[in-house]
Image (cartoon, rainbow, N blue to C red):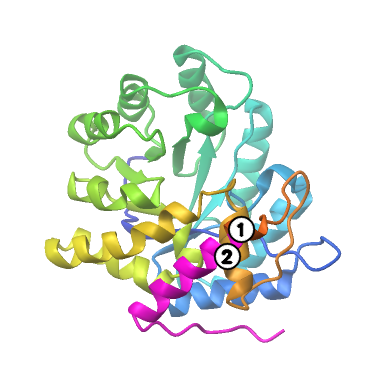
Amino acid sequence: MNKNFNFRGLATALVTPFNESGEVDYENLKRLVEWQIENKVDAIVPVGTTGESATLTDEEQYKIIETVIEQANGRITIIAGAGSNSTKKTIKLAKHAKELQADAILTITPYYNKPTQQGLYAHFAEVASAVDIPIIMYNVPVRTGVNMTAETTLKIAEEIPNVVGIKESSGNLIQIMQIIKNRPEGFKVYSGDDSFAFPVILAGGDGVISVASNEVPSLMKQLVSACLEGQLERARELHYKLLPLMEANFIETNPIPVKAAMAMLGLIKEVYRLPLVKMNEKNKEKLRNILFEVLERENVSIGFIEK
């Protein structure tokens, strides 16, 4: 497989809705997929970090991916989360994603183990050799405890054909730009932080895998499109208007704030799985004010989901 995975644009790192008893709300999940498609996002990423994959069973992950793919029905790119700190389990998840006909997988660098750079290379090489599916790596040192360097990323990009891109959440713009500058043809670089979407795309990146597009998909779509199309003034305007919300989404651990915001909009129930809990009221009020200020200023209407 060569690097012919052509996704560029806005991907939503989709939340997993739960009902009051804490079980996955599959009917509401279908509605969220429809809402994302209606707002013209370019891809959906189920069962990633924002989807609380860490507390989902394997069976729940498979059913969520299957539900999202069936509901999308070929209308949008589906990049399935398939990550673990175990290479063997990552391969198992990736194989199921392929069987379910996901377009690609997003797989995180192994966490907790703190592998060396050589270990990171070996991990992705093993996964890629076991599963013939486009693979997007996910580098997020704040979650995993290890940073995959630009050198390692580029070595993988050059030598492993079905590793087609990276979601870069290192927070290091120099590192991200080194990857963009030196990557092989066809290798995609996506911002993993909403607040970096503007600079990363303008530096030559291919899009963003977004948390904020759960709340404001139409505005995030406008931002990403303006960046990709070189509409600099519009892109800058949207970036600074959305920046307070992007920052507020991380005043507590993701996905606590984004799920709280979506509950404010009537899109989901504010239900998490332990050890995640509801926001404290002071932070929630701050988030509420920022969210509705953005919506009112941009005159955005929300497609509320009936409960």
Can residue 291 be seen from the camera position used here? yes
Above/below status of 116 relative to 213: above
Secondary structure beneath disc 2? helix
Q: Residue at x 50, y 13 (%)?
A: 116
Please identify the quarter of the rendering in which residue 86 is found. top right
Left or right, 110 with reference to 184: right
Q: Which residues are magenta?
A: 284-307
Pointer 2 residue: 285
Looking at the image, which is closer to me, 254 or 156? Answer: 254
Q: What amino acid is found at the position of numbered circle 2 in the picture?
A: Glu
Looking at the image, which is closer to me, 81 or 216? Answer: 216
Secondary structure beneath disc 1? helix
Above/below status of 26 relative to 282: below
Percent of width and height locating residue 63: 72, 59
* Image mark for residue 282: 1
Question: Residue 276 magenta-drawn?
Answer: no
Above/below status of 34 relative to 260: below
Query: Badge 1 local density, few (<14 within 10 Å), some, or many (20+)?
Result: few
Query: How many numbered marks does the figure carry?
Result: 2
- Quadrant including the N terminus: top left
Query: Badge 2 local density, few (<14 within 10 Å), some, or many (20+)?
Result: few
Q: What amino acid is found at the position of numbered circle 1 in the picture?
A: Lys
**CB-based contact (under 8 Å), mark 1 and mark 2:** yes
Can residue 15 be seen from the camera position used here? no
Q: Residue at x 40, y 47 (%)?
A: 193
